[in-house]
Image (cartoon, grey):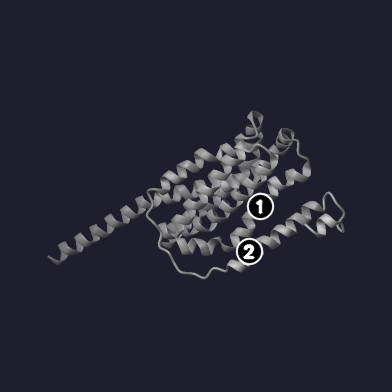
Amino acid sequence: MSGTSHVSSRGAAGELSAQHATGSRPALTAVLLGFFTIMLDALIVNVALPSIGRGFGGGMHGLQWVVDGYTLAFAAFLLSAGAISDRIGARQAFGGGLALFLLASAACGLAPDLGVLVAARLAQGAGAAMILPSSLALLREAFPDSAPRARAIALWGVSGSVGSAAGPVAGGLLTQIDWRMIFFVNLPVGAVALLLLLRVGRSPRRPVPFDWVGQVAAVSGMGALTYAAIEAGDDDLDGVNVLLP
């Protein structure tokens, strides 16, 4: 009887382990697609800048914000994205960040002028900042064992490297069709990731401190520094527009 019970318990444990492995695949695929997309978008725009300038008639000054706006929002909001991910749950944060990123990508592709494009790029950067830490937290939840988690994180790193390498190439090819395609290409990839995320259970929430004052100060400080660096390209370093944005 005890031998039968031991075999049964081992069989039940194996069944639970197989179910967990099956459930972790959608999470891993969604994370890989999401991380690939945000890394692709960080570099895909650079090649399209001349076409964007011709389309909107903006000079280098405005086009710099198309690139730097994304980087600025990404770097600034990344400071608090991890705490937000803990407070609302990794899956929820990843899904929210990805949804914001996709909506901003659609706004970029439909932008009627350079100002709207820059604003949408800022929103893209904020969404990407939420995706990055929550993707790692989601992998930690999906793969509690150290060996499978290490493999998943290695694949996560590879997906980001592939996205970075593919950015300039994809940008060059898509710009031959229409520069707006560099933003629309995010939509099908992100939509697949969101559909896969529906098969992942909700993540637990953890109460962690969140410094709103520090977040606002970081965004304001980095924004002012970026503004000064960009304006310095057109004005002297002691110009009024640089010192008093």
Quadrant in the picture for the C terminus: bottom right
Q: Which mark is residue 230?
A: none
In the rendered image, residue 199, in percent from the top left (x then y), is placed at 37, 48
> How many marks are shown on the rendered structure?
2
For residue 3, side relative to residue 165 (left or right): left
Compared to residue 15, the image places residue 206 above or below, namely below
In the rendered image, residue 79, in percent from the top left (x then y), is placed at 60, 63
Q: Is residue 151 visible?
A: no
Q: Nearer the viewer, residue 113 or 189?
A: 113
Residue located at (55% from left, 47% from top): 101
Residue located at (67% from left, 45% from top): 118
Q: Which mark is residue 216?
A: 2
For residue 9, side relative to residue 99 (left or right): left
In the rendered image, residue 195, in percent from the top left (x then y), is placed at 42, 44
Q: Mark 2 against mark 1, which lies toward the viewer?
A: 2
For residue 244, side relative to residue 145 (left or right): right
- Mark closer to the chain start, 2 or 1: 1
Distance between the alpha carbons at the discs numbered 2 and 1: 17 Å
Q: Nearer the viewer, residue 53 or 175?
A: 53
On the image, numbered disc 1 is attached to which residue? 71
- Residue type, mark 1 in image: Thr
- Residue type, mark 2 in image: Val
Query: Callout 2: few (<14), some (14-19), or many (20+) C-alpha neighbours within 10 Å?
Result: few
Query: Callout 1: few (<14), some (14-19), or many (20+) C-alpha neighbours within 10 Å?
Result: many
Q: Nearer the viewer, residue 187 or 29?
A: 187
Q: Nearer the viewer, residue 92 or 26?
A: 92
Quarter of the image where one finds residue 165: top right
